[in-house]
Image (spheres, rainbow, N blue to C red):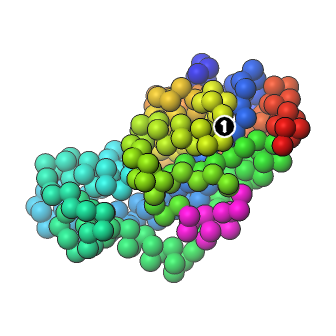
Amino acid sequence: MGARVTDTTEESSIDLLHGRTIRAFLFDLDGVLTPTAEVHMHAWARLFTPYLEGRGVSPYVEQDYFDHIDGKPRFDGVRDLLASRGIELEPGTPDADPADDTVWGLGNRKNSVFSDTIAEEGVAAYPASLAFLKAVIDDGYEVAVVSSSKNAPPVLAAAGIADRFDVVVDGNVAASLGLPGKPAPDTYIHAADVLGLTVLECAVVEDAVSGVQAGARGAFGLVIGVDRGVGRKVLLDAGADIVVQELDELIDAVSKTETTSSIAENNKESK
């Protein structure tokens, strides 16, 4: 990957993208395209606050989400959070009843809360992310969603953007193919393979440390961090090449640099 930068002005963004053969953008979903990361955070808090209190261990705090859960498959998040409190449970099975005191049972309990919230309140994509998504599609780039969540299809549908993506690699796909979740790069590599591209031709767009680590470990051509509260330095240290507050900050960089413009035009001509 290219050198990291410490400035997210338009000029530095253009310098960062110049010379890279990026042909596709691989987007995380929760926290990048939709604000559902907040819904996940609240669902986890509703699960673990009473659960840990009942266990008589250190209480659940917001930082636990970022340290142990964010960006990981649900099973891994439950297991890692419990391990941080010295709690070991039987794994159970993916179809475990939400009332079961197993890793999968707790995960399914959290998922019930999340699904109910989405059904009741709906979800809207971030306007800046929508603008960036439209820009890269219009410029001829391929796009895909790579999410640890098994809820990706209904969330995409609820946000009205399911039709923008022909390739969606979510928790269901990962489970069916036996792919390890983030921070392993396998799900992102699979998305690149489905698109018929190399990792150097793909940019990973992530807001979670584990997702940024996946992009860095996979040696992708570009890793873009979106800071939704994790912290800019944290994402850079995890392997991001650039960190922005909103994706529309990069629209001009994508459309104006000589390299990206020529790549986009080649993509259009090859379709």
Which residue bears the numbered disc 1?
A: 196
Q: Is residue 182 visible?
A: yes
Task: State left or right for residue 52 relative to residue 189.
Answer: left
Say which residue appears at 35% left-offset and 62% top-offset: 44
94 is within the stretch colored magenta: no
Whether residue 139 is visible here, answered yes or no, is no
Q: Would you identify the image quadrant in which residue 9 lies?
A: top right
x and y, in percent, of residue 210 in the image: 43, 40
Quadrant of the image occupied by residue 165? bottom right
> Magenta region's main secondary structure?
helix
Q: Position of residue 208 (x, y in %)?
A: 47, 44
Circle 1 — which element?
loop
Residue 167: percent from the left, percent from the top? 63, 51
Tell me if residue 157 is in the magenta stretch: yes
* Part of the protein shown in magenta: 153-164
Residue placed most toward the observer, 150 or 237: 150
The answer to which quarter of the image holds residue 183 is top left
Depicted 29 relative to depicted 121: above or below: above
Query: Looking at numbered disc 1 in the image, what kind of residue is underneath it?
Result: Gly
Badge 1 density bin: few <14, some 14–19, many ≥20, Cα 10 Å: few
Q: Quadrant of the N terminus?
A: top right
Residue at 83% from the left image edge and 48% from the top image edge:
138
